[in-house]
Image (spheres, rainbow, N blue to C red):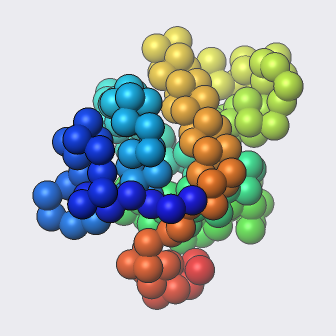
Amino acid sequence: MPLIGVEQAPILARPFYPDDGPPSPLTASLAHVPEVLEVTLPFVGRVLGPTAIDARTKEIVILRCSSLMECRYCVETHTAVALDCGLSPGEVRALRGEEEAEAVFTNPDDLALIAWVDGVALGRGAAPDEVTARAREAMGHPELVELTLVAGATLMLNRYCSALGLPTSPMTLARLAEEGLA
């Protein structure tokens, strides 16, 4: 998929381009259809961006979903974000399926969240009842609603990024190599 630089971007797409560097591959690919870009990026920004749910919790959902869906772009990009949000390299490896989550995560609420994400991402409908019950014990209804949107938006983006083969930035790849997570 050719990524559209700011010079070629349609006028409606240009407000979504940063002033101080290149656009993300997501922005540069969505610029092909600016009327979709106009609604997609604000939605994604609202759901995945800052809210009452802390960034670490959201990154557990995003990285785990992305790993389960085998989205190379999202796994690489969100590995770096997860580290920035306070997840340890071991926790990141566990979310990526490289280690057992139960051997790394000690907080029962984190383990309930991971099991719930697995049920949502891998299931063909609702997560199994016992997994959902555990998640409901770990979080309230508002959190479960919001994290369901985080998982759903991530799954949508996983399919989009994988289908179009979006490239990970060289800077992110270099960071992952430095961290031993490439």
Q: Quadrant of residue 164?
A: bottom right
- In the rendered view of the protein, which quadrant contains the N terminus? bottom right
Q: Residue at x 67, y 44 (%)?
A: 159
Q: Is residue 82 visible?
A: no
Query: In the orientation shown, which residue stands out farthest toward the top?
Result: 141
**Foreground pick, 31 / 61:** 31
**Image height check: is 155 above or below 85?**
above
**Foreground pick, 6 / 174:** 6
Q: Quadrant of residue 89?
A: bottom right
Q: Residue at x 44, y 37 (%)?
A: 33
Counting from the top left corner in percent of width and height, residue 46 is at: 35, 29
Counting from the top left corner in percent of width and height, residue 137 is at: 62, 20
Counting from the top left corner in percent of width and height, residue 85 is at: 38, 56
- Residue 137 shown left or right of residue 16 in the figure: right
Q: Residue at x 44, y 72 (%)?
A: 169
Counting from the top left corner in percent of width and height, residue 124 is at: 85, 25
Q: Residue at x 53, y 25 (%)?
A: 149
